[in-house]
Structure formats: C-alpha cells, structure tokens
C-alpha cells in the first residue's frame, strides 16, 4: 500500500465536512484518482460505483487464476505528475515491459512500430514506391478541407497508405464510414506521427520515445491494471475515505445552481462538491428538475461505441510474442488480439503453460454481435484465431465474454455542438459539479489524461485554482491554425471548428 502519511494537507475546501463530503461518481481511473487526492488532503470523500468492480474499462477480470486486461492498457505518459502517482501507488510492482506489436494485413505480419527492412520485404519495393508517390502528391497538392478523419489522414500519409492501413480498421472500429468521423479524433490519437516521422522511426528508431504512438517500452502493474485501482482503493479507505460498490446514482437534485442531494442505492447524500465521471448523457438524464429541452436533446444525441472481449485460455506456452496484434484483415470480425502473458508473465497462474488471450470486437449495444450468445462468441473467436494462424481452435480450453458499455465516445459531425450545449448548462446551473474522465467529458482520453482531469478538478476545489478541465488533452485538428475560441470544446461557440485509427492505443 502506498504511503500517504507524508503528503501534507492542502489548504482550502472549507465547505467540505463529514456531513457534506465530496461525492465522487464512478470508480474508474478518474474517480479513484480524485478520491485519492482528496483523502491525501484530509478531506472526507465517498465514491459511488454502479458495478461490483473498480477500474471501469481499465479493470482486470480474473477467471480460474488467469488475468485479463480489458482492452490492454499501457502505462506510459509524458505527464510527470501522473507518472509519479502511478509509481507512488504501485511501487516496486510497477514493471518495465517491452512493447511488441504487429499489424496483420494482406496475410502478412508487419512489425509495429514500423521497421524499415520489414516494410520493404512485406510491401515490396513497387508498393512502397506507390505509397511514397501518393504521400508526395498529398504534400504537394492543396490541402483543402480537413473536417473528416479521411481528409486529415490522407493529407498526412497519402491516399494509398490511408486505404491500406487506416480506412478499413477505423470503419470496423467505429461502425461508420471514415468520412463520418471527425478529424479531431485523428489529431488526438495520431498526434506527433506523420509519414516522415514514421519512416524515420522505421529506419533510425524512435529515440527517447519522442513519438508517443511508437514507444518501445512501457510500465505495467505486475498483476494488470486492476492492481493499480485495488491499491488506490486500499489507500483511500485506509485514510478514511469510503467506497460503495453496486451503488448506481439515480438522482442529482439541484437547487440554487448547486447539487444539494445525490441519491444512490436508495440513500441520499448531501455533497459539498460532486466530481463525476458519469457519461454526459447519464448526468443530464438524472438531473432533477430536468435540464432544459435543448440540453436533453443534446445528451440523447451523444453516441458511444461498445466493445466486447472474448477471453480465451489456450494450450501453448508462447502463442506469439506480441502484447497485441492489430487485425487489418478482411474476412474476420476481430479487430485486435491481446496476449496477456506478454504484458506480464504474472497474468497467468504460476507454473501454467497456457496462454490467456483477448479477442476484441467492436459493436453497438443491442446489435447482432452484442446480443450473440456467449457460447457462440467463444466458438467464433476460436475459429478466427485459427483462421489467422495464431492458434488452433481445438487448443482452446475455455472462454468467456466481457461486454463493455460506452467504451468509446463517438466523434461524429454534431458531437462538438452537443457537448458545448451540455457544458453551457453545467457551467451555469451546477456550480459544485465537475465532470472528469473519458465519458465524463465525452473525450477519448487515455488513463493518464483521465487521471489528470481528476487531479486538476481536486486542485480547483481545494486550492481555488481555475483549471479548465475540458482543455486537458484537447488536440484540435486546427491546433496550430486557429485561436482557442475556435476549439470545439470551448463553451458559447455556436459554430464548431469541425462542422461536421491508425491503430489506437489506450
């Protein structure tokens, strides 16, 4: 357990008391970080988690001693205070792990990060020449509009590479055409990476991990990301904080522009402040009195992408060395495959010669894939891993399915306008509420930036700072070309800058 005794109390938060604690909604990375920072400052806090497990989409599932990281979570950040917090929590059990991943494309495995000679061998000189010419044409021709994912990526990598490595994968991931995904998602997820940068890294290496998308090693808790949240929860409760599981919030009562009551599990709490990682759609939906009709309409219009992981235990000590493999191959539905033993050897029971694998599928809640019976999904995953020549279906010992709700906020044509409408209402009518985290901001953050939003929120409460939580990790497609007022997350802007993956790492 981390030592929190040496952390000095932070001045401020005079209205916080045991009768009026800070109430944190959601026990994922952002919510737990907020609670941890508060108890370090000696402030009473209650965390309300709707499910029976902490960690949100970064949780670790355990079955018969095998550990499964839902989604695969690298712990790499350029935010020093977040990195310090990770090491403070996990200590010596924070392992340094090598990154190895590949792209499966056209019945070939391409090393990722790219390696020069591997690219030449797999693509061939002719195809590589065509890709280079396509890139040069993209550099020379007028850029034109950059509102969509397709436009943004094609302008930076060329149309041919876009068609090979971005289009199919992204459309399978999101379930919509790449022309419907906003360029801002590409700008955020592929920041710092270009054709030239990728080529340079392929032939000369990514020295100093300057390009975050191409890092060669990362930290990882010995027993998966769930260990981080378990240790953080222990520290919170040992310092007097309270964590309630299976406590979904059903009502936020508002009076005089403040949340005066939080109702969860039939119990009513009186908060001084509320820090929420609930999806914006949920926050709006449980407000009492109801939010204005335009805010409710905006919330209902926000869209999310779900995913399910088919988790398999397979005979075979070393199926493949990769942490994960990106599947850019038609003919299978799986999008990415995790090999958890490569994340940490402690993800399998001691002495086991079996592998634990996660087959990731993306869907919408209620669609055919989401509603398929678990037994059929396990059979399908076993068939597909054999079709990809990674393991034999007959070697699958057992499998099960984990479904993840609202895993990815969708950046469609109207999302920015809808978020602004909701934010304007939050800022004017809920003075003691701060939204944090991925779904809390409808922002595709990784864990490090989700945790940073929580840290900034606590500083605002306890120190009276004025951090704009909505600006953490904002990477507009027009970042170098427009003023902040044109940021699609800036409030009171009625004309968004974007009217309307490369393989993504969490």
Image: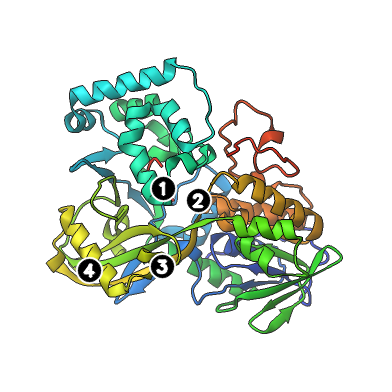
- Numbered tag placed on residue 403 in the rendering: 3
Using residue 217 as the reference point, say whether residue 144 is left or right of it: right
Residue 355 seen in render? no
Using residue 182 as the reference point, say whether residue 260 is left or right of it: right
Using residue 182 as the reference point, say whether residue 325 is left or right of it: left
**Looking at the image, is mark 3 or mark 2 earlier in the sequence?**
3
Q: Are marks 4 and 2 in contact (CB under 8 Å)?
A: no
* Circle 4: element type: helix
* Circle 2: element type: loop
**Looking at the image, is mark 4 or mark 3 earlier in the sequence?**
4
Q: Are marks 2 and 1 in contact (CB under 8 Å)?
A: yes
**Looking at the image, is mark 4 or mark 2 earlier in the sequence?**
4
Looking at the rendering, which quadrant does residue 271 occupy?
Answer: bottom right
Using residue 183 as the reference point, say whether residue 484 is left or right of it: right
Residue found at the very far right of the displayed protein: 256
| Residue labelled with disc 2 | 446
**Looking at the image, is mark 4 or mark 1 earlier in the sequence?**
4
- Numbered tag placed on residue 379 in the rendering: 4
Residue found at the very far bottom of the displayed protein: 266
Q: How is the image coloured?
A: rainbow
**Looking at the image, is mark 1 or mark 3 earlier in the sequence?**
3
């Amino acid at each position: 357990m981390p030592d929190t005794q040496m952390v000095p109390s932070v001045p401020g938060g005079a209205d916080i008391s045991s009768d009026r604690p800070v109430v944190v909604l959601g026990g994922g990375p952002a919510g737990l970080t907020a609670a941890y920072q508060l108890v370090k400052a000696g402030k009473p806090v209650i965390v309300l988690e709707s499910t029976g497990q902490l960690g949100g989409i970064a949780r670790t599932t355990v079955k018969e001693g095998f550990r499964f990281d839902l989604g695969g979570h690298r712990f790499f950040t350029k935010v020093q205070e977040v990195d310090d917090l990770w090491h403070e929590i996990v200590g010596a059990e924070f392992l340094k792990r090598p990154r190895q991943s590949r792209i499966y494309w056209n019945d070939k495995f391409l090393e990722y990060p790219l390696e020069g000679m591997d690219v030449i061998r797999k693509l061939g000189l002719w195809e590589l020449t065509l890709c280079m010419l396509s890139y040069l044409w993209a550099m020379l021709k007028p850029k034109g509009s950059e509102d969509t994912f397709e436009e943004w990526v094609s302008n930076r990598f060329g149309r041919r590479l876009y068609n090979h490595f971005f289009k199919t994968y992204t459309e399978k991931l999101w379930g919509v055409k790449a022309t419907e995904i906003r360029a801002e998602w590409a700008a955020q997820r592929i920041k710092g990476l270009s054709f030239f940068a990728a080529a340079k890294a392929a032939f000369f290496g990514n020295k100093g991990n300057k390009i975050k998308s191409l890092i060669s090693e990362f930290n990882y808790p010995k027993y998966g990301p769930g260990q981080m949240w378990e240790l953080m929860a222990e520290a919170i409760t040992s310092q007097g904080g309270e964590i309630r599981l299976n406590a979904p919030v059903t009502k936020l009562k508002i009076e005089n522009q403040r949340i005066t009551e939080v109702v969860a599990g039939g119990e009513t709490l009186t908060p001084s402040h509320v820090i929420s990682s609930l999806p914006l759609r949920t926050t709006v939906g449980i407000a009492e009195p109801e939010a204005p009709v335009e805010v409710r309409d905006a919330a209902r219009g926000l869209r999310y992408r779900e995913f399910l992981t088919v988790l398999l235990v397979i005979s075979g000590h070393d199926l493949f060395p990769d942490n994960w493999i990106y599947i850019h191959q038609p003919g299978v539905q799986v999008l990415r495959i995790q090999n958890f033993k490569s994340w940490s050897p402690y993800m399998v029971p001691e002495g086991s010669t079996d592998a634990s694998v996660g087959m990731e599928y993306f869907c919408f809640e209620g669609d055919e894939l989401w509603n398929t019976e678990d037994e059929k999904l396990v059979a399908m995953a076993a068939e597909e891993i054999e079709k990809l020549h990674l393991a034999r279906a007959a070697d699958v010992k057992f499998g099960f399915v984990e479904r993840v709700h609202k895993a990815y906020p969708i950046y469609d044509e109207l999302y920015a306008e809808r978020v602004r409408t909701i934010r304007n209402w939050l800022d004017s009518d809920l003075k003691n509420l701060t939204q944090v985290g991925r779904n809390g901001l409808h922002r595709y953050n990784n864990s490090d930036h989700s945790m940073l939003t929580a840290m900034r929120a606590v500083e605002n409460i306890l120190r009276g700072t004025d951090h704009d939580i909505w600006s953490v990790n904002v990477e507009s497609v027009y970042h170098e070309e427009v003023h902040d007022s044109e940021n699609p997350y800036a409030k009171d802007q009625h004309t968004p800058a974007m009217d309307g993956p490369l393989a993504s790492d969490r």
